[in-house]
Amino acid sequence: MDIADRRKADPAHWRLASAIRALSMDAVEAANSGHPGMPMGMADVATVLFQKHLKFDAASPHWFDRDRFVLSAGHGSMLLYSVLYLTGYEQMTIDQIRNFRQWGAITAGHPEYGHAEGIETTTGPLGQGIATAVGMAIAEEAMRAQFGADLCNHKTWVIAGDGCLMEGISQEAIGLAGMQQLKNLIVLWDHNDITIDGRVSLSDKTDQLKRFEASGWRVLSCDGHDAADIDRALTDAASGKDDRPVMVACKTIIGFGAPNKQDSSGVHGSALGAKEIEAARAAIGWDARPFVIPEDILTDWRAIGAKGRATREAWNARVDAAPNRDEFARRISGEVNDKLAPVIAALKEQALDAKPKVATRKASEMVLEVVNPELPETMGGSADLTGSNNTRTKDLGTFSPENRTGRYINYGIREHGMAAAMNGIWLHGGFRPYGGTFMCFVDYARGAMRLSALMGLPVTYVMTHDSIGLGEDGPTHQPVEHLAICRATPNTLMLRPCDLIETAEAWEIALSSESTPSVLALSRQNLPLLRETAGGNLTAKGAYILREASAAPKVILMASGSEVEIAVAAREALEASGVPTRVVSVPTMELFREQDAAYRESVLPGDTVRVAIEAGIRQPWDWLLLGERGREERSGFIGMTGFGASAPAPTLYKEFGITPEATVAEARRLLG
Amino acid sequence: MDIADRRKADPAHWRLASAIRALSMDAVEAANSGHPGMPMGMADVATVLFQKHLKFDAASPHWFDRDRFVLSAGHGSMLLYSVLYLTGYEQMTIDQIRNFRQWGAITAGHPEYGHAEGIETTTGPLGQGIATAVGMAIAEEAMRAQFGADLCNHKTWVIAGDGCLMEGISQEAIGLAGMQQLKNLIVLWDHNDITIDGRVSLSDKTDQLKRFEASGWRVLSCDGHDAADIDRALTDAASGKDDRPVMVACKTIIGFGAPNKQDSSGVHGSALGAKEIEAARAAIGWDARPFVIPEDILTDWRAIGAKGRATREAWNARVDAAPNRDEFARRISGEVNDKLAPVIAALKEQALDAKPKVATRKASEMVLEVVNPELPETMGGSADLTGSNNTRTKDLGTFSPENRTGRYINYGIREHGMAAAMNGIWLHGGFRPYGGTFMCFVDYARGAMRLSALMGLPVTYVMTHDSIGLGEDGPTHQPVEHLAICRATPNTLMLRPCDLIETAEAWEIALSSESTPSVLALSRQNLPLLRETAGGNLTAKGAYILREASAAPKVILMASGSEVEIAVAAREALEASGVPTRVVSVPTMELFREQDAAYRESVLPGDTVRVAIEAGIRQPWDWLLLGERGREERSGFIGMTGFGASAPAPTLYKEFGITPEATVAEARRLLG
């Protein structure tokens, strides 16, 4: 059926879906950048989903028991923004839609978590959404098991495109979800057969239904432009008729409604242009001016946005009546558990007495053994290296279809999928996830680890075997550049403790974090207890004097993790030969950077020899090695200190201060 | 059937396979580290493969038309080393096997390309092998199409484990191979149902046969301990009866032959121990001392290693008689094409005249437009961003099942699979691959990019949209830390040209590289031609004076890529107000590091103000900003400057010089 036939076949539905199409093409046109094809192609599916299936209340975006909606094909962000505006999310005003992709707007090129309520996760790097949704669905099952279906019983809906399904991470997600029988997870595949380079068949001929089925999914299909057929499929998908997650192949035409450009890659990622917009308006029967939604249509959409209110109020009443409501509230708040500090303090005191010589991966396990029983919100796991990562403690059962109260996830050999699932678990709420693999496999997990940082999710990566200290497995498994990679990543805490006490402090920092992921780099090999005090959290200083020199230091040795032992030994030799030598432990550069200048000067005064020791590359150490006061005052850097933003490039250069003017000003400042 | 039954059923096969089992368990025992389970489990399959199917000649490991054998499950390295020794590869002596996983041995924990002939690619990070093999099979098809089946007609065999198939990259490989109908690619799946954490079902329930079928593979099964059944399946697989790649599920028992430990995760990654080795020797009927292969068995194995000789000699004769033998020899040599330099020189001269203001991604396309017609060995591609990466030139046809002479690959939305395939294309020989995606998706491709560097493969990554300069797509697509990531990676050339001339120079460097991968970071936005000379290759200096100060410089502005324009503008402002200012373009830090001290001093003298400008994080710039002579002489670093190695950890620390002694010596040196 062509556009006209569709329009005639179901006018009540058509007018609602047309509002998405109109807003999407107008916003992309105004920005002169963006992706109209996907929002126009999936407008019908999204309309039926929000109208008839998604449990939500636009007036209460944080309602815990809402269905989660993840737009894995994040380039179709205007689909999400349109629906958020139409259903009445307060923050998503028409002005925000008008300012799509502009500096300061919450309507970034790709949906950015934290920009606007209703954006459940950041998407754009393809496949992240579907893999993050798996974590959300895991958390939903686990919370339901712990608090009951009265308090937690909702679905996770995903819209994924061909790109999401071609990315390798999708297989990790599909495999994990299938094995875990996440029946409340429903993926709507935008089966439009178009990628940027042309037809999907140019690069892939996978039978996606068969592929999902092979990993234990139930699969359905529908005509993605027939509201009744969509409704039928979504009803079936949501029925929970068996224990499998569900994939619905929605056969669509990309850019549907743009009569001359639809069904081509030309409509994927470029504005339609005034002429084609005119043609599209005629074709879909849309008379309103750009960014104007006719009153009657907006009223109907707003009613959709409000239809969940009674359900939410009933849920509120159930929560109020629940005996465990306080713990439930604490859990979903994500607040730091006040039992953490005393547990850590006690462990450190014991360590000072017992002076155990253990690998920091083992030290990490010792921390978790005392923390996990006190913090029911931890959710551990490993990418099939449990015995090596030391991530599993005795009290954690295995999370599985048979045991939803288990708090340990066998993620399988899926580092990327694990990292994305951890993001999803945190985003869902109720749990504080941590997961382990070898440090070197930061490489495999990077795509999702970057999103942890960009979204500001305090998940914890337990990265063991953190250097050549792992030995015989060889260079493929020996991280060399990975400490630098994590330190280079904005909003990431790279913690590399040197002994049990620093490991306990590192975990305290990680589990107290509110908006920063932590990477714990842990040794395979045993390390002695080097700390001589247990009070305070010295690791939180980033760097501190571990061994003072016998007199004014002539040499400062700096090191992290397993190399601090080397620094301490070297100091003894230097001191023995009359060279006053200080050892500075540097468990985390990021936190040292945040200390005031006086503290930093007290730890690293000028005019000494400095030697840094770390079994990784030098790049991150240069500022500590070379940045003595005199030189810092003679050098400047014009660049980035955090992640970017969505706006035209010239605006970004200006806003982030990467300009000739800023350069000139910095040079002048340095010239004095 | 148990061990005794198998032994009785086919004694002639059993003794050959037992040699693999014995060597593997003995080597792992001697090293007290390693993975006996996989070599013992797949010994029967490997024996049949090498005995009856693999086309090779142990005396001529570099024979171009050999079948390629890729051990994707690289932890089972002793399987490969055993077979290389048994079949008579000269380098793989019994002493090397005895020194498995020791410093200086070629028998690293995981197979390392370049350590020994017969190791076709580095494996260990799971899934890399199967994805690299896809590239090999692509190159085989393409070389056959270009030079005929007389010169190129061989298969690529892969042994992959459950871990390989759980990693996301495997889906990218499977999808690409299925679409491309690589019928000479045969994957032997070690279907042992065990991972490190236990049964596969703990984390995955995927029906792998169905999954491969869904992506266009032919699938077969066999009893992996029945030589006749293995032979049947491999014969069928190699028959080329249709156009699909083939996957053979080999049902095996991990650690088969170790009677008390087989079929458990305990046998996966630990030495068996003396007692179990004794039991295994009894069970498999092996009386010889450790590392000794009975003469008759070794003789039979050596005959297997020599059986390909006549085939190879016939091939040699065909090559000698081929009219295109010189070009064929040139192509498979991998040598740098001497047509490159004049083409680049001419383009630079033209650029100097025309002064085009173009994005460096467009500049890159202009380079490729003149290079590709002259260099038939280039093989381009993109991960579905062809129009954005500007990677496709007019003369390149599309490589597809219908057109094997095409030199442009639509990799699909598979950055990781693309990078691994590029590694495989180079390793196979005949082509010099390049492939494009957005710079930010270094994150997705990292696992394979690291292997490019570790193996020393001169592939080229065309990474466009290299900063916030991409604009509206927002922070998910804006690289910030990725320049630092690439610069932190050993043996990686991170090239960020500022205009067309530098882009041409960068390509000249990349296409002249013999053992280092190149990453070209290219702008989305237009940039003016800044260079005022075209002679020489200034980019190869790493950093050079682009604009001299009007007098002795008081300020030095350093920048790379799109920010050099900013530096030049800032210089004009500073000069106009009487501040002598030099601009140093820094297209590649790695090459600047390699210049002698006199040159570096001439470019960056001390006692000036220095400001660096780059739309990324500061970390890589600290050494240029802060490392003035005085300070460099007062600071040292004890750490890594390249990748690690396989040996016990204490040995590695000693060999790489990360010791108290080295620290003390460095401190003393700096104290003077």
Image (tube, coloured by chain):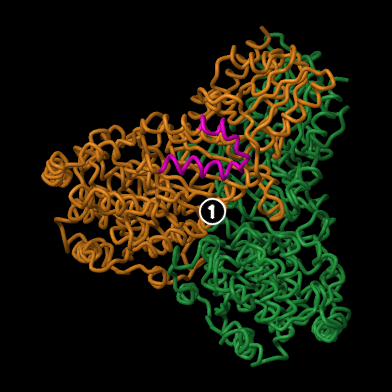
Chain colours: A orange, B green
Residue B34, horizontal then vertical, whole percent? 68, 62
Residue B566, horizontal then vertical, whole percent? 63, 26
State how many labels appear.
1
Compared across the picture, whether A461 is left or right of A244 comes to right
Compared across the picture, whether B441 is left or right of B458 comes to left
Q: Residue furthest front?
A: A353
Compared across the picture, whether A112 is left or right of A4 comes to right
- Rendering quarter of residue B147: bottom right
Q: Identify the residue at image location x=69%, y=52%.
A: B460
Image quadrant in which the N terminus of chain B is located: bottom right
Q: Secondary structure at mark 1?
A: loop
Residue B497, horizontal then vertical, whole percent? 69, 38
Q: Identify the residue at image location x=78%, y=41%.
A: B349
Q: Identify the residue at image location x=71%, y=71%.
A: B79
- The residue under label 1 is B385
Relative depth, front residue between A141 and B357? A141
Asked whether residue B187 appears in the rendered view, the answer is yes
Vertical side of B582 occupied by A439: above or below: below
Magenta segment includes A363: yes
- Rendering quarter of residue B581: top right
Main secondary-structure element of the magenta-colored stretch: helix
Start-end of magenta stretch? A348-372
Q: Amino acid at mark 1?
A: Leu
Dot 1 surroundings within 10 Å: few (below 14), some, or many (20 or more)?
Answer: many
Q: Identify the residue at image location x=73%, y=37%.
A: B588
Compared across the picture, whether B377 is left or right of A518 comes to right
